[in-house]
Amino acid sequence: MNPPISSAEGLAGLVFLVMLAATGFGALIAVNAERTIRAVAGLALCFVGVAGIYYFLQSPFVALMELLIYVGAVCVVLVFAVMLAEPRPEQQVGKRNAIVGGLSFLSASLLTWGLVALANGAAWCKAPMRINEGSMRDLGQSLLTTYSMVFELVSVVLLVAIIGSLVLGRAGRSKA
Amino acid sequence: MNPEIVRVLGYIVAIIAFVALNAAMLVWMERKVAGHIQRRIGPKEVGPFGLLQSFADGIKLMTKQLIVPEGADVPLFKVAPMLVMIPAVMCFVTIPFSEQLAARNINVGLLLIFAIASINVFALLLGGWASHNKYAVISAARAVSQNVAYEIPMLITAITVVMFTGTMNLNEIVMGQAGGFWHWNILPIAKNIGMVVLMPVSFLIFFICSMAETNRAPFDLGEAESELVAGFHTEYSGMGFGLFFLGEYANVFIGCSLAVILFLGGWQCPFGLFPGVHWFLLKVYFLIFVVMWARWTFPRTTFYGLLNLSWKILIPVSLFNLVLTGAFIKVF
């Protein structure tokens, strides 16, 4: 069934297509860009597209978290690292090789085929019918009940990462 | 045409027009406030009281050429000003101007504003880097470390409000503050006597952080004219610079309107009479006036002073505040 483009559903479908295109295009930029900073920008575009797809899957909370964490934090940290390290702009990554190219194409298509087969074979649960409600409450409850152990472990990993980076940062500094 | 689409288009046009008009009026207001604080008059030639000055400036900016500096990363250089503007406009989607006047009533509205506003930092970084200018890069690095430092206490104080009201829906947060200023979240005498002590602290932290997040003086280290020419937008001419400016003023409006919605009762009247969009705008523009007042009264802080204020004072105080809030909600 194809709703007309002037209806609300048709327009929503158009926005969905734009989000898909942003995801794919951003991913292509992230992989193919020669300058690191452009690759990060492509990655950010890809994340925005993924966030849009989450929104269409009726989980605005996850979409917003994707924006807040991945674009607002991860990409910013990546750009920050690039700015501080400042790699040379026109760095030749390595010569293109026919055999390597063919092998990578083969492995990429195998991976894609595997993912598609998984997606087609999996038993998907039905999308929740509530649009503006539930997802955040369910998420909070499951984080504090079913997955509380995982949640705590993740926070411990983050704590270790913070302390480790502090130790590494201190090590390079002379005692002043 | 479908009425839903007409509604969406209407809100888009109205919001963009409001953002532009708001920026024009705020530039005029800023210059007038600055003038009177420094015992000058401020702009007065163009139009009555100089009201049309910013429109004249806007036309001038739009007629200027966009110069791309040599060695700049051209696509990123051109994308950065738009990336400042788009999130600023998108944030308006969930701000309730009055009970009926909100483009979309989203259940996680507060989170939406924080999530979308976080893109702003990324745009500043890209603009600073793409300019191929050392001042711009230094300024972008400063702006980011500042934003990261102040986002933490801001989010923590926002959590205290969410804990107190029990919702992230901005509309419901305002609804819960109906019936006079003694119901507002900043001094909830009528609801929870314990929170009367904590909420002003939350408000103060939130307001300071929103000032710092929008790179306003005394926290405008990112565009310290005396050291960095003009900061991350040094290389931008014409409307490229204009968009950075529009985005900044839109963000000031968003920060102040969030403070009004969370703490000062949104569109509610202080005495419970005639609630509506006029009260909302009155409160927001009063807070914006306070922001300008602070800018022209206090000198710029040092960069270390800025980071120390956040990491050593605001974050511990806000964490302590969060714990106490949880306890007081249980006890009282």
Image (cartoon, coloured by chain):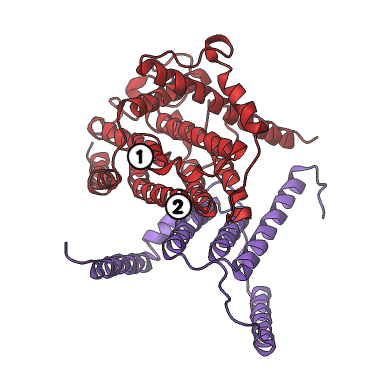
Chain colours: A purple, B red
Most extreme residue toward the top is: B48
Q: Secondary structure at mark 2?
A: helix
Q: Position of residue B126 (x, y in %)?
A: 52, 53
Secondary structure under tag 1 reads helix
Which residue occupies the extreme bottom position in the image?
A: A99
Inspect this view and state whether residue B99 appears: no
Marks 2 and 1, how far apart in space?
27 Å
- The mark lying in front, picked from 2 and 1, is 2
Q: Residue at x 41, y 18 (%)?
A: B35
Q: Which chain's residue wears label 2? A: B
Q: Which amino acid lies under the numbered mark 2 shown in the image of this protein?
A: Lys
Q: Residue furthest front?
A: B70
- For marks 2 and 1, the one nearer the N-term is 2
| Residue at which label 1 appears | B209
- Give the camera-side residue of A43 and B135: B135
Pick the front one: B108 or A14: A14
The amino acid type of the residue labelled 1 equals Cys
Q: Is residue B200 visible?
A: yes
B266 to the left or right of B315:
right
Q: Position of residue B294 (x, y in %)?
A: 34, 27
User: Would you call the spot at circle 1 few (<14 residues within 10 Å), some (14-19), or many (20 or more)?
Assistant: many
| Residue that badge 2 annotates | B134
Residue at 41% from the left image edge and 56% from the top image edge: A141
Pick whichever, B111 or A127, lies toward us. B111
